[in-house]
Image: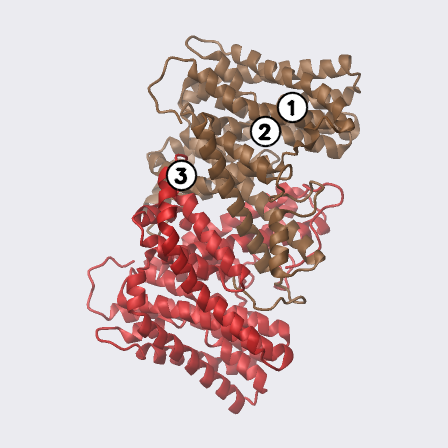
Chain colours: A brown, B red
Amino acid sequence: VFFMPIVLASEASAGGPQILAAVLLSLLVIYVASKAGGEIGVRIGLPAVLGELVAGVLVGVSVLGLLVFPGEGVSTSGVMEFIRWTAGMNPDQAQQVFQVQGEVLNVLSELGVIILLFEVGLESDLRALFKVGPQAATVAVVGVTVPFALGAGALLLLFKVPLIAAVFAGAALTATSIGITARVLSDLNRLNSTEGQIIVGAAILDDILGIIILAVVVGLADRGEVSIGRIAYVTVAAGGFLIGAIFIGRLTAPFFLWLVKRLRTRGDLLISSLVFAFALALVANVIGSEAILGAFAAGAVLAETDKGEDLKLQLKPVADVFIPIFFVAVGAKTNLGVLNPAIEANREGLIIASVLVIIAILGKVVAGYAAFGGGINRLAVGVGMIPRGEVGLVFAGVGASSGVLSPALDAALIVMVIITTFIAPPLLRIVFQREIPSGKREL
Amino acid sequence: VFFMPIVLASEASAGGPQILAAVLLSLLVIYVASKAGGEIGVRIGLPAVLGELVAGVLVGVSVLGLLVFPGEGVSTSGVMEFIRWTAGMNPDQAQQVFQVQGEVLNVLSELGVIILLFEVGLESDLRALFKVGPQAATVAVVGVTVPFALGAGALLLLFKVPLIAAVFAGAALTATSIGITARVLSDLNRLNSTEGQIIVGAAILDDILGIIILAVVVGLADRGEVSIGRIAYVTVAAGGFLIGAIFIGRLTAPFFLWLVKRLRTRGDLLISSLVFAFALALVANVIGSEAILGAFAAGAVLAETDKGEDLKLQLKPVADVFIPIFFVAVGAKTNLGVLNPAIEANREGLIIASVLVIIAILGKVVAGYAAFGGGINRLAVGVGMIPRGEVGLVFAGVGASSGVLSPALDAALIVMVIITTFIAPPLLRIVFQREIPSGKREL
């Protein structure tokens, strides 16, 4: 914040103003891209989030290179070049500033998805979620087993991929990006529809199943074997956490409200609620589950209290500030280079990818039709589960770093993630539009 | 801090969950401390911000050590020990996570003061500020020259300090922490009073003068001489920027409103306004001025538009989330160790400090009496200028790193900053309370 008129090369706090400048410029790029992308998306009839993702791709590593995250094989970005040019840093200093500002943006993006899931929890109705629980569980289980079996089978039989790699890739096909799905539903005003609640419930169960599957396949990849104790721990941690958090949250909510009503300083409700959400996110993170599950549980519990509506209003501006960072970052990190068929090495991956994409889409659509009960738009449920988003990228990233996946298979997984992520928002809009109009305003 | 790149051995994203966990836990500590401190402060009749600062000291490097920033000579913190324990990191990994989470918190704290000054700008009335401009300018100039002359003179004559060191220490006495002052005024509901506007105006001018003075003394300290060109550039950059930003901002505000009214996606007004504020903050930072001046100018310009009131409402929750990070961080970074008279080495510093504290307080009170015009609480204006806060710490930090200041004199400056910062909020409350009640609710 405080500018020091000279660059103090030897001083401990040197680099501070440059890091701040890089983060500010990155936030400017993010906000301008997300607004421009979202507004164009809405105007051509697509959900705002797809515009934000595409805008992220445009400013990211694939196209303009303005916003690049360290560790993508590129060691600078448009933002960093500008800061380096204005601050007159040497290459070593610039490299350090690049690393640090990247980590800062990563944390801001993670806070973005935590706040997104907190907001989704606040919008959710636990009773309604419990009511659609059996359907959601069926959709989740079918949506995990079908893509896994078809994917691993196809890779083994058609492409003669080694067993462990096929299992790993099959696992990557099971993911659902709750962040992208929930945001699309929210853009379409369908978060509270029966279909929306089934999708959210199934996506949360998918997240829990995904954590368990990741533990299994990483164990397989690392040691060629599976530790039953580890799997049991991960299962209990992921599943038990959500149930425990909701149960304990409901017990402690009255005390929480009692406390909030006694606070007299600014931000009484909002900060107390964020403490609640961050605490559950931290517990989830620390026990080896996912921070977003904790944030969702916190939101769902607070939604049941009589402060739920107030909190939603107060959280909205905070969500508006943090959430676009997440979506633009997901887009910016997407490397479209793997899609270029002019590069010889991409071709095998593209052929595998086209098979995986079909399996990825069909597997989730089939899962949607597993939702029993009358009056449900089953196709919409299935389509809502299609985007793999950041969860799929985690599988691809872990697979690449563990050395299990061949470069072609790794590229194929990334292509599968890109296509499922970008195809789902417009598809979801189409399948919802075929319904009788619900009277709600649609964006 | 420039530290060794965080890229861990093989995997670029390793450490990510630990960094997120450390930031989440730090935010929990910050929010719990700020709420607890603020609520206790309000209940015992002090401004909330003083409670937040004291709570920051309690959780910071001086007392509990839960929240420690890298570069304070301590290489871990309570937060880090917890994360290290739960994640089972080795010392090298823990050190890297400690560095990165510290940088993330530094940036969040800097965003906090940027948003604080944006909010102060939004609360300000440019016409009223221009109207009190002559008074504010008088207060600023007297409040800079009197502490400087008395401070440097006393150090030269009483303590036989070398000339350059005396000039440097005198310069540190000239600062005013606009962040702390504005927040106290806001806590007391006096930001829009004539006194409040004079204080804000004078504090902003002080900031500009401070940037110029720092350039002069750093030039003196580094080379024993002053570069006229550099001083001229810094003067134009700091003073010209604010005038230019307000002028250009007023010209472009209609276009900005035209654009905002055409946006259809969430966060239309808020995100567009933050883009405006961050852009001006970035320009200020890049041209070598202070980011907070840009944020203030953006707020002051937007306050004049017909969206000003809407924006204030939407910014409030965002401000509630970011601003406490700044105040708790200022407290957490305050090292009370220099106040311990049991340590031999502190005693000389404490004697010098007691003289500097008296000069620091008297100099600003005298400046308050320089505010001409009738019906002004001149004592309140002077007292409002007392806190040196983070601006004073920058002088002490630069002095310490440049080697100009002896350890005793450096410690004395830190003591002066601590005492002026912590004494001003309760004093300001007292001098405002002696007035005839204004009918406004006071916290």
Count of all numbered marks drawn on residues in the image:
3
Task: Identify the mark at residue A316; answer none if there is no mark.
Answer: 3
Residue B164 appears in the picture as rendered: yes
The answer to whether marks 2 and 3 mark residues whose Cβ atoms lie closer than 8 Å is no
Q: Which residue is mark 2?
A: A389
Residue at disc 3, secondary structure:
helix
Q: Can you say whether A222 is above or below B96 in the image?
A: above
Q: Position of residue B325 (x, y in %)?
A: 48, 54
Q: Is A274 left, or right, of A164 in this rendering?
A: left
> Do discs 2 and 3 belong to a common subunit?
yes
Rendered residue at 75%/23% (across/down): A347
Q: Earlier in the sequence, mark 2 or mark 3?
A: 3
Q: Earlier in the sequence, mark 1 or mark 3?
A: 3
Q: Position of residue B128 (x, y in %)?
A: 28, 64
Task: Identify the mark at residue B241; answer none if there is no mark.
Answer: none
Q: Residues within 10 Å of mark 2 (few under 14, many from 20)?
A: many
> Looking at numbered disc 3 in the image, what kind of residue is underneath it?
Lys
Residue at disc 1, secondary structure:
helix
* Quadrant of the image containing the C terminus of chain A: top left
Q: Which residue is mark 1?
A: A416
Residue A250 appears in the picture as rendered: no
> Do discs 1 and 3 belong to a common subunit?
yes
Q: Nearer the viewer, residue B59 or B307?
A: B307
Q: Nearer the viewer, residue A305 or A179?
A: A179
Q: Can you say whether B424 is above or below A268 in the image?
A: below
Q: Residues within 10 Å of mark 1 (few under 14, many from 20)?
A: many
Q: CA distance from mark 1 to mark 3?
A: 32 Å
Mark 1 or 3: the one toward you: 1
Rendered residue at 34%/58% (across/down): B42
Q: Nearer the viewer, residue B376 or B133?
A: B133
Name the subunit of mark 2. A
Residue A177 sits in quarter: top right
